[in-house]
Amino acid sequence: MDVTPLYFLILSAFIFAIGAAGVVMRRNSIVIFMCIEMMLSAVNLTFVTAARFLNSLDGVLVVFFVMTVAAAEAAVGLAIFVLVFRGRKTIMADKINLLKW
Amino acid sequence: MTGGLAYWLAFVVAAILALFAAIMVITRRNPIHAAVFLIVNFLAVAILYLLLSFQFIAIIQVLVYAGAIMMLVVFVIMLLSAEDEGKKKKIVIPTATAIGLLLVVILLVQLVAAVAVNSLPGVEGEYSVERLADMGDVKAIAELLFTKYLFPFEVASIILLVGIIGAVILSKKER
């Protein structure tokens, strides 16, 4: 029984789709944010799989940069949540309508 | 590399763990439980990285994702006094959820079809498993990072700096 790259790719497709479902269905902003992180890590798995089965390191380097951006995104995004919560007393995505008028 | 019963078992266990944790993340009402299951998901993905024999990326995954980012998320959940969602309204706009689920299923079918039809297009590189095991993958990655990818590396450091400054300015009390 061989584990082919296809299994890894399909697994990461499933994790990505579950994360997308979370983004679409949940209303808590922090849970939506966590689902976005999960989708990022699913894409990372695709990159690493491609890197392994093509005998290349480029995918690993891309994953390295994606993780950097994810860390910066986490810092800024969570600061925004704290800011919104301070002003609105809620972080439910359907109650934050700052951009509507 | 990818043969053997032990390898297969490890892959199946890690894959099922990752999928189970991912489903738990989007179904738990309490954000803290979702966060804990997300950590489980990240650890399972780290196991998959190990199975692909990239030890460095697996360790970075545990350090950065399961460690740093999730610590920050849990901290903010605690800070914002996690409110339960959907306690008053049990049914949260069923049509919107149904349409969302339908779109996600279409997305999943597209993704699976895309990876199943094409068998990994791309150019073969020179870093085989044996060569990486010989020179060590940390050394190989560092070599690429400071030669071919030097400019993106510097940009990444600037992104982190801007992230730090942005987080401090955003969470500062107004004067």
Image (cartoon, helix red, strand yellow):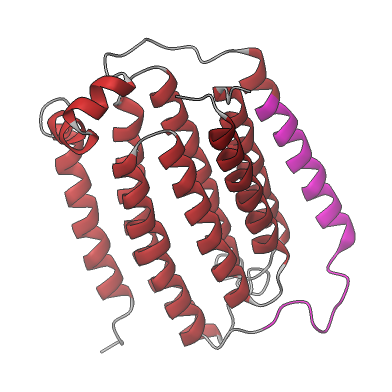
Residues in magenta?
B84-112
For the point 56% across and 87% down, which residue is it?
A89
Q: Position of residue A62 (x, y in %)?
A: 33, 34
**Residue B8, picture quadrant:** top right
The answer to whether residue B131 is seen in the rendering is: yes
For the point 54% across and 47% down, which residue is it?
A39
Q: Position of residue B44 (x, y in %)?
A: 52, 51
Q: Is residue B85 one of those drawn in magenta?
A: yes
The answer to whether residue A44 is seen in the rendering is: no
For the point 11% across and 33% down, which residue is it?
B146
Q: Position of residue A64 (x, y in %)?
A: 30, 42
**Residue B92, picture quadrant:** bottom right
- Front residue (pair A28, A54): A54
As drawn, B169 above or below B146: below
Apparent side of residue B112 relative to residue A65 in the rendered image (left or right): right
Q: Position of residue A70 (x, y in %)?
A: 38, 53
Identify the image quadrant of the N terminus of chain B. top left
As drawn, A101 above or below B136: below
Q: Is residue A74 one of those drawn in magenta?
A: no
Apparent side of residue A35 relative to residue B29 in the rendered image (left or right): left
- Front residue (pair B172, A28): A28
